[in-house]
Image: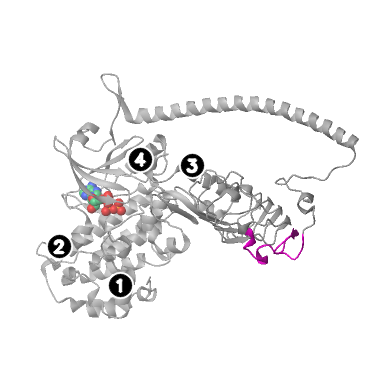
Amino acid sequence: EDGSIGYHGYERDALLALKAGFNNSFLDGNWTSIMCYMNETPYWYGIQCSNGRVTGIILDRMGLVGEIKVDALVNLTELETISFKDNSIAGNMMDFTYNQKLRNIDLSGNSFDGEIQLSLLNLNSLESLQLQDNKLEGLIPGFNQSSLNAFNVSYNNLSGAIPQTKALRSFGLSSYFGNKNLCGPPTPTACSATTNLSEPNSQNPGKKSSGNGRFTAILVVVNVIVLVVIMFLFIIYYKKYKKLKTEMKNVLVKYEEHDSKIVDRAMEKTTSEGEIRRKLVFVENNGTTNFELDDLLKASAEGLGKGIFGNCYKAKLDFGPVVIVKRLRDLKPLNGEEFVRQVRVIADQKHPNLLPLLAYYYSKDEKLFLYRFASNGNLYTRLHGGRGTGDRVRFLWSSRLAVARGVARALEHLHLNNQSETTAPHGDLKSSNVLIDENDEILVSDYGLASLIALPIAAQRMVSYKSTEYLSQKQISKKSDVWSYGVLLLELLTGRIPAHSAPPGTNGVDLSGWVHRAVREEWTAEIFDAEIAVQRGANQGMLRLLQIAIKCCDKSPEKRPEISQVLAEVEEIKVGGDSEDEEYPYSSFDRSLTDDSLSATPSLVVGDDRR
Ligand SMILES: Nc1ncnc2c1ncn2[C@@H]1O[C@H](COP(=O)(O)OP(=O)(O)OP(=O)(O)O)[C@@H](O)[C@H]1O
């Protein structure tokens, strides 16, 4: 097992097998990708984890149907709690032999039948066993764990004498009530001498004598014949099974060879000594000089930070160029072929406002993406950096409008190249993913990476998954990108940090709610960043951009405009004449916001988007 990825594949397989038996559409949608990662909050509904291991399964009142295989829990050795309370699960109980840490078991309110599992007797930490309201039959096993402090088998079809162990004697009638034929304390019914023997129960196989000797002899002969036939059939079956297994193995080996050949072809080269060496794969036409992984390893590297897709480094190669290296982590379990296919999709997204992928590297243990270095940093730092200090470089309206345009163009390109209705083609649009190169060109980064990382990680960390529609309906779409774009515009206009994309350790505000409140309560002068509010000639343009932003941030995704429409409107905004150096008190906004501009678009203030 790969401990480094923080989860355990065989546990995941066990849970997926369990899920398959339930045929439950919610779980089918929710239990995808990995269930837990180290000590982070589990990603799957109803799963508890510790150190990447599954410690609890709690699926109460989920309408679960079907049966649970007897060996379903064999691989979940860290399990402490299991609860399937109030579902409609049928069939025999599962085997608990390998779940020695189990403390709480609640299978109540289902249709479990057959006998109570004897493996429960060996769970030395068992504290609570709730089996009431099922269809269990046979005898109650002699539970005697001193840890047991809650026990209920009421309303089943159990029969026979209640074992008079120290542990079981401590529970009252309510634990046993509603069974077919239980006797002995605490029930009022005394047991007859033959009670237990008369019950059909494999755990107590005493059976009544079945009539005369002749009949018994015939029965024995028939039994022997049946046994011989069964053994014969078993031998035939076993031979066939062995043959099938060997064939399967051959097919698998062939498949793996084929798979690795594809990866090899894409990513490996034969050196002059004839040995295979993995190499960086350069995306064609990128205009850079190609180099080897060794060159990269020799380069001086500076850590830029840890993003949701992995750590980012700036590497200065010995022979001159500077590249950005992203070490991808938390990836979906993709084989080489699938990885290459997804990378091609990203690499093919060519647009002047998208940060181009230069090269990639794939091996079992390491996946790298190499990007062009954008020397003027990211929008987040440009917009918020150095405020209140002498280091602050003024960020003028014309530059902010250029950012709004560049990002909208990039986003439109991504949307036009993605036909899916159920994905946000960027998915993680935020100011730290908008880069500025040496010519002040805008480059949007981190697009397409959602297709590579595990869904729970994406759902937990990516901006799209923080939109209203994901929070309420668990759905994202292109309109989720439009919403992120609207918030980015508000960030540009207000100079404030949005809560949902604030870097760790930074406090952000609910920008959309805040802007609506400001418009309603007429403290409009405060909406615009003082740094641009003073550029009076640009006021109309700022108001236009604010209106667009508010439309993009509509709570209902269907009311938000398409990105093409947004782009068209942003392109129409004029920078605003000679405004750059003109400075007026920013209260000059008051009248225009409350009277002219907003009254012309009443929907702006009606659709309150406070969250
Ligand atoms: N090509 C690049 N040129 C210059 N700086 C970059 C480049 N790529 C990333 N950065 C900067 O490096 C830092 C780390 O980037 P990274 O993408 O790993 O994290 P992030 O953008 O903060 O978060 P996330 O992964 O959620 O997008 C960020 O400040 C980012 O702006």
Say which amino acid is labelled 3: Tyr
**Magenta residues?**
168-190
Q: Secondary structure at mark 3?
A: helix
Gap in Å between the C-alphas at discs 3 and 2?
Answer: 50 Å
Q: Which residue is mark 3?
A: 10
Q: From what the image shows, is residue 28 above or below residue 495?
A: above
Which of the image's four quarters has the C terminus?
Answer: bottom left
Q: Which residue is mark 4?
A: 343
Q: Which residue is mark 2?
A: 386
Residue 568 x %, y %: 31, 59
487 magenta-colored? no
Total labels: the figure holds 4
Q: Quadrant of residue 210?
A: top right
Q: How is the image coloured?
A: one colour
279 on left or right of 69: left
Q: Which residue is mark 1?
A: 515
